[in-house]
Image (cartoon, rainbow, N blue to C red):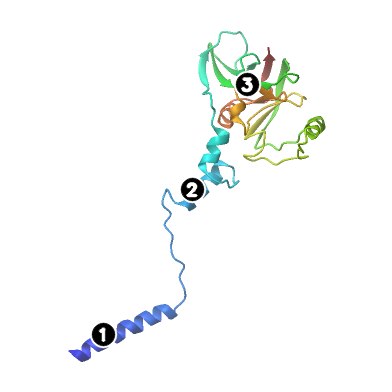
Amino acid sequence: MKTLAIALIAGLVSTSSAFAAGPSVDPIEVSALSSATHKAGWLQVLSSGKPIASEKKIAAVSRAPIARELVAFDEKVAPGTIIVVNSERRLYHVLGSGLAMKYAVSVGRAGFIWTGTEKVTRKAEWPTWTPPQEMRDREARKGKVLPVSMKGGLDNPLGSRAIYLGSTIYRIHGTNQPSSLGKAQSSGCIRMANEDVEHLYTQVAAGATVIVRD
């Protein structure tokens, strides 16, 4: 009996040694829904492949502090028309049948506000920001150096989407400063929360009319 026990122990030791000496096998990692690895991949998808720090940062620059709402709208304009009312700090996307989607926006501050009618000429996702030389000079006088160009991303002032207006320098675009919405703080562009501009972006086509009024 004692001999049998010794033989069994020797066999186990031998088997263990064989595994240790064999080729190494990478451990299989099962990623839980809440794991850091899984979250990182999910966040990269949300930011179009641009890795970011956390969900908190996405929320900070993307959520609208003032919720969009479906409202009655009887003005006789073609469905698809966008109307920005500077005094209200609101943008209306006319849906037809007496309805419009209303969004909170930031409009031009004193000296930069404008009115007029333009057409949507193009759209861009995660647009590159190229501040006009006039803006760069103006900010330089305040001691702030603006980049010649900045690639799209969550830190980009244009946010996640841009809708270009005619041949002007103005756009309807997202922002990384959602606290400015409902106020007159821009340099003439119409700012929206990232989640709102993405919602509008999918429904607006090139050639749509944009009316900016007092």
The nearer-to-camera label among 3 and 2 is 3
| Circle 2/circle 1 CB separation < 8 Å | no
Residue behind mark 3: 183
CA distance for labels 2 and 1: 47 Å
* Image point (47%, 76%), residue name: 23
Q: Looking at the image, is mark 3 or mark 2 earlier in the sequence?
A: 2
Label 1 sits on residue: 8
Q: Does label 2 or label 1 sit earlier along the sequence?
A: 1
- Classify residue 143 by image quadrant: top right
Lower sequence index among marks 3 and 1:
1
Callout 2: SS: helix
> In front of the other: label 2 or label 1?
2
Could you tell me the amino acid type at mark 3?
A: Lys
Q: Position of residue 102 (x, y in %)?
A: 56, 18
- Picture quadrant of residue 46: top right
Front residue of this view, candidates 171 and 187:
187
> Could you say where residue 132 lies in the image, as x and y percent from the top left?
79, 32
What is the distance, in whole Å, between disc 3 and disc 2 at their CAs? 34 Å
Q: Amino acid at mark 2?
A: Lys
Farthest residue to the left: give it. Answer: 1
- Classify 84 as above or below 151: above
Residue that badge 2 annotates: 39
In space, the residues marked 3 and 1 are separated at their CA atoms by 81 Å
Q: Quadrant of the N terminus?
A: bottom left
Query: Looking at the figure, which quarter contains the C terminus?
Result: top right
* Amino acid carrying mark 1 in the image: Leu
Q: Residues within 10 Å of mark 1 (few under 14, many from 20)?
A: few
Image point 68% across, 15% down: which residue? 211
Left or right of 1? Residue 43 is: right
Assign a secondary structure to mark 3: loop
Relative to 161, say whether 208 is above or below: above
User: In the rendered view, does 169 fall on the left or right side of 76?
Assistant: right
